[in-house]
Each structure stands twice: as C-alpha cells, then as structure tokens.
C-alpha cells in the first residue's frame, strides 16, 4: 500500500535543513570527523530502515548531505509513501566520507521523525480502509516543522486539514464564549471572510450541533463525543456539511469512531507523539 | 521530586518562538479570531496540565503570548522541573483575548512537547534514583529544538551530554572504520583537539574496549551490550574513564542496565519519541 | 463612509518596516540629519493628507518613527478605513526631531501607497454600493507587501480573496490545458485537497461554464466576458456556486459589470496600479 | 530608442525574489498546481507584453522560475531598456510545467511593475529629448524594491539621484528650520561630511536661492516653483551648481519645466504611482 | 582633546550585537556562569581603560549587557571621542550578575577594538593638528564591522571617506587598465552616475595627474608618491579638486606627508591593523 | 614550516561572506566598476603576498569572487598554513573582470586579516618550537569572525581552546567572587555540567593554585604570574591537570614563559591586535 504526496520544492525546506545542520555543527564544526577523516576520503552509505514502516522525508533528509558537498549522489530505492520491511535499503549515498559522517545525524533525525508520523498515520488509515472516513491531521505539530509533518501525514495516506490560522475558520469553544454563542460567532465570521474560506464549528453537544447546522457553515467538528452521540450527530448533520470527529482517537478506537459515519477523524498524536521510525546508516569507506 | 535547570536567556529562544508563531499565523493571520474577537476584549486563561507529569518549558511557552501583546501578564504557580498532578493550573495568563487565542496553539505545542520529554526523563531518573547512574540525552533531537529539548531533559533530572558535533569528540564505528582502528582514530583526535575537549570512544565488544581504555581517552560508549557484557566492561574500565551505556534502554530495562555500574545511560527516545504531555488552556473572557 | 479592518499584529509588519528603514538608511545612516540636527532636539510633526481619500496604514506607517526612538508618541485623529478631506491632520507625532526626520520618507511612502489602494478600492465599492456585488483583490500585489496591500483593500471596503497559492484552489486555463479539461482538473484537485479548501474554476465561455458548474466546485471565475455573456453566465450558475467577474474592470465599467448579478468583481489594478495618495509631514522643532 | 542600465548582480536581488516567492507560496505551497500538474510535465511559456512599453526587469523576473527548478531555461528576445510593441514575446521559458505555473504570478508582478516604471520614465525622457534636462527619480519608492525601481528608471532613460539617506546630503526645509537657516545648515553639513559627499539644498524662493548659492554647495533643489520663477532661479544659479526642479511634474508639464533650463527634473510618481505594464504568459504543455 | 561623532541609532548595531553574543553563547549558553551564578544575584561592574587612549564604542559595547537583561543600567562617565588616562572608569554597569558575566567578553572585544581604532586615528590627527590636512579611512575594514569602525575613526577625529562601493566613484589603476586610459574611464563614469556622486581618480605619476585634472573630476588620489612628487602633485592640482595621499603612511611619516599640502591622507592600517585598547571589567557582587 | 588545519565547510562561511560583500556593495552596487567595465570583459588576477608571512583564509577569501559570478575559476599555488615569501603569487583568479574588481576588497580584507593572525601565531609557535608548550588562542576575537580567526590560529600552528562560552567551563576570578571561593565554584560546576565538559580554573596565586589542584579539575589557568611563580606553579600542579599561562605574552617573552614548563600559553593579541598581512591583486584584462 502506498500514498504519493506531491513533492515539495527544495526552496520550501532547504533553509530549515541549513538551520538544522548549523544547530548540530555549532560554530566549531564536527571536531571528531575533522580530526579523523581526510577530506579526500570517499565513502558509500546505505540509508536503512531498521524496522518496518511507511517512508516519508527521503528526499528532504538526503538533501542534507548535499549541503556539505556538491558532489554527493543519492540513489533512492523507494519513494515517500512506500511501505518497507525491516532492513530495507531506502537509498544509497555516495561521496565525501567527511560530508556523509557530518550530516548523518541531521538526515536520520528528519527521516526517522517523518517516517514515524507516516507510519502512525498509515496504520490509522489502514484500519478504516473499508470505510469512507478519512484521517486528517491537526495544528498540534512541532514548531518549525509543520510543512514537513503535514507532508508526512499525506505520505501516510491522510488527507489535509487547514495548515494554520490563516487557512480556514475553525470556531472553537473559546471563540463561541467571546462571541456569546454559535450563531453570533458564525455571523461575524461569515461577514468578514472571503469566499474561498470555509467555516467549521466545534460542537460538544447535540444541542450545539442543532444550532450550528442551521447556519451557513461548511463543516462541523464533533469534539470528544461517545460513539452513540457521534452517530446521532452524523445523522442530524445535513449532507452538505462535512463532519469531523476529534478527541483521543487511537488505533484501537478508530474503527469504532469511523463506524459513526463521520467524514473525517482528526488525530493530533500522529504529529506530536508518534515514535520515530528507527533508521540508520550503513557506512563503508571506498577510498 | 524536582530538578531546576538554569533558566535560559530570552534571546536564546525568542527567534524560534517568533518563527513558530509566524508558521501558524501564515501571511493572513488568525482569520477566526480576527473576525470574531474584538481587539478590546480581555480574558483570563489558565494553563492546565490535563494529566500528571514533569513540567518543562513554562517560561518559554508562555512568552509566546507576549509576542502578540506587550500587556499580557503571566503568573506561574509552578516552575520547570516540578512534578504536577492532573488538572494542576500551571500558570494564569491575563490580557488581550485576541492575543491569547491566537498564540494558544503554539504555546501549548511547545509546553506539551517539552513537558513530555521531561516526564519521560524523570521516569527513567526515578527508576535509577538509588544508584549512581545518571541519565543523559543524545543528539537524536528535533531539528531546530535541540536547545529546548536538552533543557527539558535537565528539567527531567537528566545530566547533559555534548550538545552537538563541536562539543566533544565521540569516535563512532564509522570513524574507526575510516581511521583503520581505534588506536589510530584516537591518536589523530588527540593530536588535533584542544585541551578542553574530551574524547569518548564507542566500542561494541570487550576486545575493542581493551584497545580503547589503553589510550588517553575520557569516556567510553558501551553500545548495545547485554547485561553481562556490560558489567564486565564496567569492571575492565579504569576509574578515570567514564562509562556510558546506550542502545534501546527503556523504562523497563533501565534498572538492569544501571545495575552494571555504568556512570551514564544515554537514551535517544526521550527526545525523539516521548509522547507529549497533555496540556490545555481554560479560557474565560473578562470584559 | 468607512470600513474597519481587523488591526494587524505588530509582529506581522515590524520586520518589513525594519527592512524598509534599513534600505533608506543604508550603511552610513542619514548624513543630512546626523550632521545638522542635535540628538537632543525635539519636534512635533503632523501627518497630513494633501488630498482627499480613504486612509489605510496609519498604525503601520507611524510605527516607523518608534523604530528609531522609544520615546516617540503618536496621537491619531482618524482610523484606517476613514474617509478624509484634503488637509486633514491624520496624526501627530512628537519626540526626537532626528528620529522624525530620518523616518519620514519611509513612513510617508507606506502611508501614501496603502491609502492610495484604499482610496481606489473605496471608489469601486461606492460605485456598486446599492448592489449585492462585492469588490475583491487579486494576487497582483507588490512583492513583499501583499499582507499590507490586502489590508488596504479591506480598509477600502473590499472583501478578501485567497491570499496566495496555498489558500484555495483556483484552476486557470493553463491548469486546464495540462489536465486535459475542466472535469479532469477539478477531479484531481478534489481528490487531493482537504475539506477546508475551496475550488474555483476560471472559464472563458458559456460552454466551459456548463462543464464547470456540473462539478463539485465552490466558485467560478468568469474571465473577460462581455456584459451579455456575463449576465447569461450568472443565470446559468446555480445559487450554491459563487460567481466572480474579472478582466479590466474600471471605475467606469464596474456598475455595468455588477448589473450582471455577479457576486464578486476582482480588480488587480487597485493593488498594482493605483496612484499613491498624497501625504506629507508638517514639521516644527519644539526645543 | 533604448537605454541600457548596467546589469545587476544576482546576489543583489535573489533574496528579494525568494521572499516574494515565499510570500505567494505560503507554507503549504501551490495547492492547485501540486494537485493537478504532474512533476514530470514539461512546458513552454512565452512572456508577452500585452501593451506597448519600455521593458525593465526581464532578467530579474525570469530568474523566479529558476528558483523552483534548476533546469529551467530562459531565452530572451529583448533586453531591459528596449521599447516593445504590444504582443511582443519578450522571452521564452522552457522546463518544468509545475515550476512555470507556480512562479508565474511573482515573475509577472515584478516585470509589470518595473516595466511600468520604465515606460513612464521613458515618456518623460522622450518629451525633453531635445533639451539638456535629465529626468531623475526620488526616494518615493516602494519599501523593499528601491534597488529595482531605480534600475527601472535607468532602463527608462533616467539618470540617478542619491539612493538613500546615506548617499548625499539633501538639506530640506525641515533641516533648515532646525538649524535656524540655510547658512547654518550648510555649514554644519560641510564640517561633518567627507569629500565624496555632495550637498544639495532645497529652496522655495529666490531669496532662499540667493542665500544658498553663496555657499559651498553642489546642487540646488528648486521646489514647486512656477515657470517664471524657475527660469529666474536657473539664471541666478552659477554654472558650477546643478539645478533640480521638483514638484508635481507630469508628462503634460515636463517640457515647460525643462524650458527653464534646469539640469534635472525629479519625479516621484514614476516610482510610486506609475501603472504597471500589462504582461502575461502564453503557456503550452510540451510533454 | 576630543571629537564627538553623531550617535548611531540602536537599530544600526543591535543585530550585529545579537550575532556577536550568539557567536559566544553558542547553542548551549554560558556553561560556567549558568552553573555557578544564581539568577537572582546582582552585581556592579566598572568598565575600565587599563591603558590611556581615545574612547569609542562605549554605547554600543555596553548595550550588550541589556540584550541579556532588561533591567541592566549603565552610567557613563565619558563619551565616545574623549581621551582617557589609564585606570579611568568609563562606565558602571549594574544589574544581574549573570547577565554581566555572560556578556562581558563581547562588550570588551568591541570596546577594545573600536577604542584602539580611535586611539590610532587620534594620534595621526594630533600629529597634523596644526595643518589643514585631514585623516580619512579606507575600505580596509573588518568584514561586518565597517559601520562601527568608521564611527571609531570619526571618534578619533578623522573625517569620512566613501563608505563603500556605492558611495562615490573611485577610479583605480585596474579600472583605468580596463577602460584604456584615464580619460576614457572618467568619461564613462561621468555619463553614468548621478549628480550627487563624486568622482575621484587614482594616479601614480605626474603624467597621469596631468591627464586627470584636465577632466571633470572632484578628487585625485595620489598613490604611493614620495614627498617631492607629492608636493609637486599638490601644486599642479587646481584648487577645486581635492587631493588625497595614500600609501603606507604611519605616525612617523604623517607630518612629512601633510607638509606637501594635501587635503586628505588616507590610512588603511587604523582599521585593519591598529592594536586594540586594553579595557577590562572590575566586577563585584552586590547581593 | 607549515600547519594544515582541517578545511572548513563552505556553509560555515558563505553567509558571512555574503554579508561582507553586501556591506561593501551597499544598495546601489559598485558605481565605479558598473560604469566603466563592460560585463563581457574577462580578466586574470594574481593574488599576491606583498610581504612574507603565513597564509590563512585563501579558500575563504577567493570564494568571494564566485559569489558574483558562477564562472570564476581559482587556481591555488599554496595552501592555508604555508609560509610564503614576499611577492609570492598565492592564487590566480580568472573570469569576469567586473566580478573580480567588485569583490577584490572584501577578498583581500579577509585574506590579509587571517594571514596576519596566522603569521603572528606562527612566530610564537616557532619561538617555542623546541619545547612542549603549545600556543592557544582566547575568546578575544573579532565579533562575527571567531570561526575564521580560530582557523587562522590553527593555520599558524596554534592549538585550540574552547570556542565560546558553551564549550567548556572556565572559572574566572569573578565567578569565584560570586561563588565565595574556588572550592564552591568548582563544586557547583562539577554538579551541573556533563561528562564531556572540562573544567579549568583561573588562579592568581600559589595559594589559589593549591586550593584548585586539590579539586576535580582538568586545567588551571595561571594568570599574569612572573616567571618564578609560574615555574613554581607548574611544579606544584599534578601531571593530570593541564597548565595554561596567560597575560601579556609577546614574541619577546614567550620563550621565557615556556621555560616554566607550562603546557599551554594563551595569547589574546594574535586575534585582536595582530597587524594584517599585506596582500594585493595584480590584475590584467584578458578580453
């Protein structure tokens, strides 16, 4: 099984990659490698998945090596969105031994994190594969890495949600509290935002749902409802309004939640708490 | 139980915080809050731990609110390094409702991640509390967040390891392969690096250990050894050389590893795979 | 008449303001003022509209003075979105004469440009005031200033359109050419984008319109149609799909275009070709 | 007719170009193109002037495409400073369809703006072609784009003025007010600035002119004078002092102003209010 | 004796100061101070000149402390441009002991360097005090510090020269070689540059001088001439053209060079090779 | 004689190089070269040492030319760390005359400064060549250039010291004053810092030395001691603790200081006060 997200442009991640490498290099650089490895030494290194999982971030991660040496080459065996078994060689990097050893940790940190997110997402997606429900991410991402973590969710087979605060109106309980009610909040939003912006409203109860779906909204976020309430909520929501369930959905519960018929299930933990995939580098000097 | 890391200077994290907020704001800003919340509305928000854990990043996270409004005030009830029970109010934020709602997600993302790391570390530290072994982190951190994640480890009671490639020599298997042996690698490093730089050597076997400890090194990394080998390795290492065990150590195995008598146990997963602590904001408009 | 856009956060424009001031200061600073004006001299300066128009950017522009001196004060007489007559004093700046003279040009350049955009927009909005049609901007903005220029359009009474490439799908002729048809293009987009993203399709003919409105789209861009075709197009578009007219609409033609019944008229020239409003500074030393 | 400004170095504008592209890409990138266009699709696109005008910014604008794909090629048919008729193909871009479509708007926004400035300047220059008077720009430029807008003025046949506050002393009415007179102001400036810095003084009346030209100054700015006063002013100014007329000069009045014999006429509106030239992209997929 | 340069704006040097502090702090911060000094400890520190000299950079250097703590206060006893004797307390810094100790080295590095430049310049200025000749700097400054080093020259009593490549035309031997002669080079420059830009020509011989002074130039650089040739050159140069001598002028030779009657003597070594002034911090904890 | 420091990665210095070039280019660029030199003109330029010395920074400095033109080639005759005689051609640069002339000053400023540091260091190193003592640098470097200046020290044959505040604990008199004694200060540091961090203590007297060497420290800084005291201090320090002498050591005194038997002599002046090496460019147009 696989999902193929549209590739990112290099200008979308190179600055982040340079910062990450600078963070590890510090001011004085790689003391160990600089002392031990002759700049003329070449090497070959296989990027290997130590455990099975869904790959994400292979292009991004291996671009790290090229930041240190223009002549590094990378041959990929798999693509982002592919599932791999343990011990799969994902890609082979060839070139300056010094560049490979110095960039190794940054490359693996990224690849492990993004593949971990894709793997966790893919498991959820697989669990509801026979249903119409789609898995979507949240804004609970790592500061500075949202673009890549969202990309990893897509590699895991998830759909997208709004990227950030500027990409859609999501009216939450606190907005409702300030506005003095759902109807007032939606009214103000509808008056202000352009025609390309969708409005989603978070509701905690069926009463709130009733108020929300009577308004000109595009989606409704059914927050922390039990299965019965969720199913009732889906039934009471008109077809034209997207339903999204959220709140502590895990691999164990995702099928039950999907059974309610919701369009979307959003999960924060795939980006904030999924364990990294174990990836490593099998290295050998070649000259 | 608690650990109090030296506080960070604001200039060490404000640029990261600005980037994180910009990432969420996008170009067009918080469409929802801007449409619904009057700029003159004030609010009070309690930052709450939804589950028990060790707090880290409270100053950093709450500084996010101040980036959007100079008049925000933050009153803290606990300090980084404190253990808290579920439903503890960690801090109270007062000021512009608009600023609080817009900065909320970035603040919580950081606080949850850092407290998650501190909580995971604290559990390991507690498990070996009656022993001399200390828990230390690795370079397997999130790109761009190493400073904060290392701080979180200290808040969890961990000691520090080298921050990055420039802060100590750690000779790994690949360096040894390039140099043609441990003795050659250490020799080159000792000739090159200054007197403030320590040298640690990674060894996989007792034979390698024997070669390493005969050299002028400061620490030895005992990689992926079983308990018996580890204990033997510790016995064969002279007092003056620090011993560090690494490789898949979990809460379940940490006591057994510590029983070998190693000085340090390094754990990558506390920074790359620890789940975030569940933190939230209890918000109420005040005017 | 006036329109009040939600105020921007200072962190959304201060970096741009610093760059603009640095661009004018160069490396060596304001040679004239530094040579002539004693740092201790104070002054008062009225920011004045030399001609009538709609104000936009007053907070942003006057924040420039504060970048050079913490003790500058600004008292505003009007707000963004207000209409003013010629010779209106918009705000009064008090403080260091040196800071005021050095920052003057940057402040006026911004205020003039943004107010020019607001003024042009307001004229279009006024022309169709008795109709349901709204004026919206395009992505034809000045590189680096889109946030502010879009804000100025809102101050002029315009609604918003998608901010950039990431904020909605707008399928243009070239996308249709690549996809091999409207149906194919919409299909691919619908499969890929999340539920918060709207899809708009550009059509040049009624045949294309027919194909487009049969699909699951949210808006249709009626490009460069004459009045009769436009009216026909609006009639053939179902209520649930927003209609947008574009293509060379001016103050002279906007009423006629609106008469077709379109929901939105988009105009690029208000951001790329509107003349700046004439604003100046009436300055007097006070000590 | 044409004017050939010295080409800019790429490092002088690439950072601005990257910012402009980032502004349009947002965090999530080009949703439309990413969803619809296969990364392997190639295309050819002609950059076309829709109306006649003077070209400026062709190298800069077309460099945008290369930021997204290293293999883009650009063949230019004209050079900056050339006059073109409507429907002229200025350049042909070949390569990744995805890169071309995503970068299109930024490239056209820049090319349109800069060519608009060049076109407006060229019209003024042509109007006084048979006279010794030269057209010069002011500091009334768009924040962040002064380098490019000044370049566009040169492509239009204009001469240069001081770039910013650090590139010459221009003593204006407010400086004179602070100093307590022209003589005092010039004295302070002459004492302070180096031998490579010229001093120009703004005067509103013939009395002020008389005071100014008696001093060691290099140029005099004759501000907002009517034709008769201007002519008198030019006569009373010694040969060694450059005369510059400013204040609301348009295409309609420029010949009359030049008839006064002034050396320079400065016009702010060519940079702050000139309409953009209408430029577009004729695109066709090639594979 | 003293010279008072116009003060710099904080925005002109704060970014450089932040970079310098970050360079010293590294990623992990001040390990020593963080481990030893309680954040609550206050201190007082006198900034002291260990040897006599001319002060420059006191405001800039002491601003470093404020970057780490908002509550630091600085009381200055002298101003930039003042001469001080050994052991003079230049300023007293009070506030967080931690901030003072961490920022100390960056502050002293800057103050020592800038005061060293001012001291060297002041010695040259004093040596020709009874003559009309002025001392000017070159572009031989430290990368990244030109603004501050030029300021230090002014604090030493020197005049300014062009700041960089954009601030005046200086035609050197290599430009002449490319152009095929002085006359051709000056002609091209005069045609291209605006009226605020002065033109200076470097000449090595009296023959070259003769060619140069016949042209419309503003200054002539007499490069590496012996005293007799220099005197002859000054005599042959018309009054309206500034003469500048350059080439290995030291404290020992500056009077002899000035005796030739040149207007300016430029010296590169005051910025690239002047020894730093010895400055230190006398520190005492106060609580 | 020569010393070969490990080469720096280009990403470690390119941003600094771009800033330095931007500083010189200003906003408007190289007015002289742009006016006089046709973009199509090629040239050859020899980078020449005008006086004898030790070379450092040749790769870094010549990379400046490539920032302005991709087709520049550089052929090096020597390597960093080599000694050269006066008039040695260090490297030959070929390519765009415009790029060479515009980048010349930045390239030479860097090469001169770094070679000056290397030359000064090499003289000290040579003076103690027959002894075990090594020369090490301090943190008294130029803001923004520490990485390069430290590299130059290594090219001069010096060893390294801690790079900055994060790379080792150096307990100075002020830290001792705050802590209330050496023992307390060392105790706090040892408790806080990781096993890869060495601790060095500054002592002024033999009494302080006695207290320090009884503690678990790695090095001792013998500050400003006379020869006899220094020799006594070395004798009283156990073998396992590194001894470092500091305080006004010059070429004249370095042998005497080394005779005390100290391991290291640290010298601040090689980075803050060494005169630049005289380097120049011999340029000739080739087409």
Image: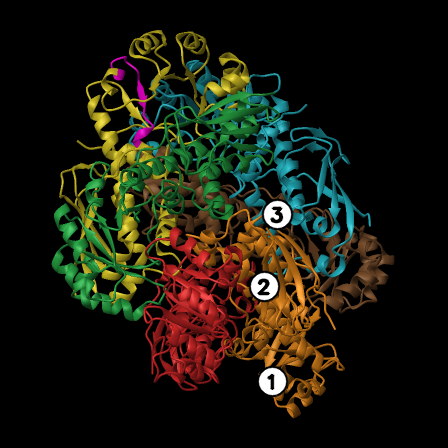
Chain colours: A cyan, B brown, C yellow, D green, E red, F orange
Q: In this view, does B264 lie above or below A99?
A: below
* Residue B229 coordinates in the image, percent (x, y): 83, 54
Q: Of circles 2 and 1, which is in front? A: 2
Q: Residue at x 29, y 36 (%)?
A: C152
Residue tagged 3: F71
* Residue F185 coordinates in the image, percent (x, y): 57, 74
Quarter of the image where one finds residue B147: bottom right
Q: Residue furthest right?
A: B207
Query: What range is drawn magenta here?
Result: C257-270
Q: In this view, does D274 lie above or below C32?
A: above
Few, some or many residues within 10 Å of mark 1 (<14, 14–19, 20+): some
* Residue A159 coordinates in the image, percent (x, y): 54, 25
Q: Disc 2 or 1, which lies upstream in sequence?
A: 1
Residue tagged 2: F281
Q: Residue furthest bottom?
A: F228
Residue tagged 1: F208
Q: In this view, does F267 lie to the left or right of A182?
A: right
Q: Mark 1 lies on which chain?
A: F
């Amino acid at each position: 099984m696989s999902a193929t997200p549209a590739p990112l442009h290099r200008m979308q991640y190179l600055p982040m990659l340079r910062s990450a490498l600078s963070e590890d290099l510090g001011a004085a650089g790689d003391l160990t490698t600089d002392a031990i490895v002759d700049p003329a030494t070449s090497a070959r290194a296989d990027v290997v998945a130590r455990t099975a999982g869904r790959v994400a971030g292979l292009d991004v991660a291996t671009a790290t090596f090229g930041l240190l040496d223009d002549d590094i080459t990378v041959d990929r065996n798999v693509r982002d969105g592919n599932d791999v078994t343990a011990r799969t060689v994902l890609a082979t990097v060839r070139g300056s031994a010094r560049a490979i050893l110095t960039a190794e940790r940054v490359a693996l940190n990224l690849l492990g994190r993004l593949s971990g997110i894709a793997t966790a997402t893919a498991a959820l997606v697989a669990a509801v594969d026979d249903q119409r429900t789609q898995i979507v991410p949240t804004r609970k991402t790592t500061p500075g890495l949202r673009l890549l973590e969202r990309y990893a969710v897509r590699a895991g087979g998830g759909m997208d949600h709004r990227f950030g605060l500027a990409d859609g109106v999501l009216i939450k309980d606190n907005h409702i509290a300030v506005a003095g009610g759902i109807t007032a909040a939606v009214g103000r939003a509808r008056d202000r935002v352009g025609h390309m912006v969708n409005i989603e409203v978070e509701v905690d109860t069926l009463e709130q749902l009733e108020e929300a779906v009577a308004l000109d909204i595009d989606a409704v976020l059914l927050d922390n409802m039990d299965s019965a309430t969720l199913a009732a909520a889906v039934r009471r929501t008109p077809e034209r309004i997207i339903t999204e369930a959220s709140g502590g959905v895990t691999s164990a519960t995702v099928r039950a939640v999907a059974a309610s018929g919701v369009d979307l299930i959003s999960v924060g933990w795939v980006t904030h708490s999924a364990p990294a995939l174990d990836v490593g580098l099998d290295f050998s000097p070649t000259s």
